[in-house]
Amino acid sequence: MAILCSKNTICRHLFRSKCLFLLVFIVSCSPPEDPIKCSSNKSTCTITNSYGMFPDRSVCKAANVSYPTSEQELISVVSMATIAKRKMKVATRFSHSIPKLVCPDGEDGLLISTKYLNKILRVDAQAMTITVESGVTLRQIIEGATKAALALPYTPYWWGLTIGGLMGTGAHGSTLFSNGSSVHDYVVELRIVSPGSAEDGYAKVRVLNETHQDLLAAKVSLGVLGVISQVTLKLQPLFKRSITYQMKGDLDLADEALRFGRQHEFADINWYPSQRKAIYRIDDRVSSNTSGNGLYDYTPFRSTLTATLAIIRTTEENQESTNDANGKCIGAMLVTSTLRNSAFGLTNNGILFTGYPVIGFQNRLQSSGTCLDSPQDKLITACSWDSRIKGEFFHQTTFTIGLSVVKNFIEDVQKLVALEPKSLCGLELYNGILMRYVKASSAYLGKQEDSIDFDISYYRSKDPMTPRLYEDILEEIEQMAVFKYGGLPHWGKNRNLVFEGVIKKYKNAGKFIKIKEKYDSLGLFSSEWTDQVLGLKGGVNIVKDGCALEGLCICSQDIHCAPSKGYLCRPGKIYPDARVCTRISSKRLI
C-alpha cells in the first residue's frame, strides 16, 4: 500500500548567487528539507516551495500526504480520494515552482508526493528512449542516458527538477535548433492517472503517445489533469560540446540577440544592463573525437558557507534601507568579474579552468546543482536559497517575448537604463538577466512562437510593505514585457500580476480546457489558483494595501504602494500605460 503520512507526522534556471566569495568551494552541506510538513498536534499539514514563501506569502495546508512508491499505489491513492471527492495536488521532492501550483483548496485536501516514484524503468538503446517514473530528477535522467551512450539534448541548467515538474511547468534550456529547448517536446509517451468513474475503479490510467492529441495538453499540464506516473523521452547519441564565454558591450544587443541564437546551437546571453555589457555563450556541438573532458559545476549552484550568505544578505538589506545604489553597483561589478574569471564554474578537466574553449561530453556540461546531494552538516553550508538560513530571498520575474518584437523590448529596457543608469545594478547582483532561446511548441500551453526567455531575479524584502530600491523601474520592465509586448510567463516562476489574463494568449487554450474537463470533470486536481490562471474563476490579482510592492496587483491607487515611505502610484517613464510605485522626493537617489 502507499505510504500515507497523517497530520501528526513530519512529512520539501535556480538561481544565481550574488555571493561575493564565489570561489569558496565547499564539498559538504545540508541538502534541502522536504517541502511538506505535518504538525505534531494533528492540526494540519503544510507545503511550501524550496524558497520558503509563495508570492502572496500564504501558507498552503492539507489534511494529509501520500507517498506512493509505484503506479499501482498511485492508482489506489487517486481512487480513494476520488470516491471521497477530495481535492488533490501533486508535490515533488524539491518543490522549485514559485507560484502556488502545489496548493490544494481548503485544509481537507490530499498532497500526493512523487518523492518515491523515482525509478528509471528502462533505457532502449536501439530506439534511443528512456522511460522513467515522474519523480525522477533531471540528474538521474542524464546519468541513466549516459550509461547507454545517449543524451537528452536540451535541458534546464538546474538538475534538481523532476520530470513531472519539468513537464507541469514547461521548463526548458536554450536553443532554436531541432524541436527546441523545452523538455516536453522530447516526450514520446506518458502515462497519467486521473479521477475515473465507478466503471474505472474511480481512477483512470491513460497511455498517451504521439498519435494522441491529448498528449499536447498533458505535455504542459500545470498539474490539473491528474498525476503523471511515467514518461518516455526521445534521446540522441551522446555528443560533445564546445563552450566559450565572450563579453561585449550591449550597444548592439537588440540586433545581435536575433542573430546569435541562429548561429550557435546552445547559445544564451547574460545581460548586465547597468554595466552596459553582455556575456555571450558560444556553445556548439563538436566531433566526439575532439579532445577534452570539461565539466560544468555552475558556481552559484554549489554549497556555500551559511555565515557568508548571511553577511551578503545583511549587506544588501543595508543597501536597500539606505538607498545605496552605488554600493549595489560596486557589488554587481565584483560578482560579474568573479564569475567571469572563474568561467562560471567551467573546468577543462573537472578540476581546473585553463582556458577556452571548454570541450566535454553533453552529460558533463548540460546541467548541475551539487549543493543538493551533500551530507548533513547542521547547516554550516547550504544551497544559497535555503529558507532555513539567512540567505538569498528574491522575486523572480521570467517571461518569454517573441523574436518578432524582442528587439523593441531590449531597446526599451536600454532607454530606461539611460534614464536611471544605476537602476538595474540590483539584479546584476544575481548575475543579470539570463536570456535563453525557445522555439514554438505544439503543446497547448507551450510557447506560441520562437522567442527569447528573460529570467530576472532581484531582492525581496522580508517585510511585504517595504519597497525596493528602484521599485518603479523593475515594475515597468515587468508590465512592459507582459502587456506591451505580449510576453508569456514561465509557468513555474513569476509574481501574480504576470498571470493576469494570461490564458487569452494561448491559441489552443480552449482545447486544453476541454481535455481538463474530460480528465477531471470534478476539478479534484484544480484549485482556486489554477482556476484563476486558466480564466475559469476571476483573476489572480490580490488588491490590498501595498499589493503592488509584491507584484500581487498593478497599482491604481497610492495605497497599493507605500505612500508613508514616499512611494506613490505613477505612470511608467517610457511606457505610460504602466502603473508603478515611484519614489517621490525632491532629490532622486544618488
Image (cartoon, rainbow, N blue to C red):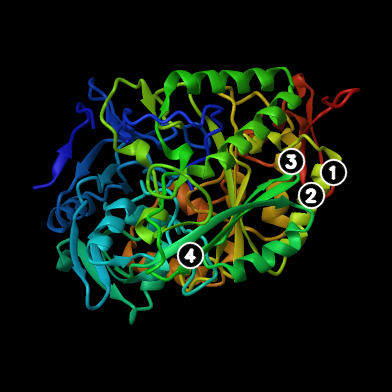
Along the line of sight, which residue is nearer the eye, 405 or 138?
138
Q: Is residue 45 above or below residue 574?
A: above
- What kind of element bears circle 4? loop
Residue at point 76%, 49% (across, down): 413
Tag on residue 339? Answer: none
Which labelled disc corresponds to residue 418?
1
Looking at marks 2 and 3 on the same chain, the residue that comes earlier in the sequence is marked by 3
- Disc 1 from disc 4: Cα separation: 33 Å
Q: Quadrant of the C terminus?
A: top right
Which is more N-terminal, label 4 or label 1? 4
Task: Measure how far apart labels 2 and 4 are at the Cα level.
Answer: 27 Å
Residue 196 or 574: which is nearer the viewer? 574
Q: Is residue 544 above or below residue 128?
A: above
- Label 2 and label 1: CA atoms lie apart by 6 Å
Where is residue 364 drawn, in percent x and y?
37, 54
The reply to whether dot 2 and dot 1 touch (C-beta < 8 Å) is yes
Give the spatial CA distance, label 3 vs label 4: 29 Å
Residue 586 in the image: above or below residue 291: above
Q: Label 4: which residue?
A: 181
Q: Which residue is mark 2?
A: 414
Image check: 11 left or right of 368?
Answer: left
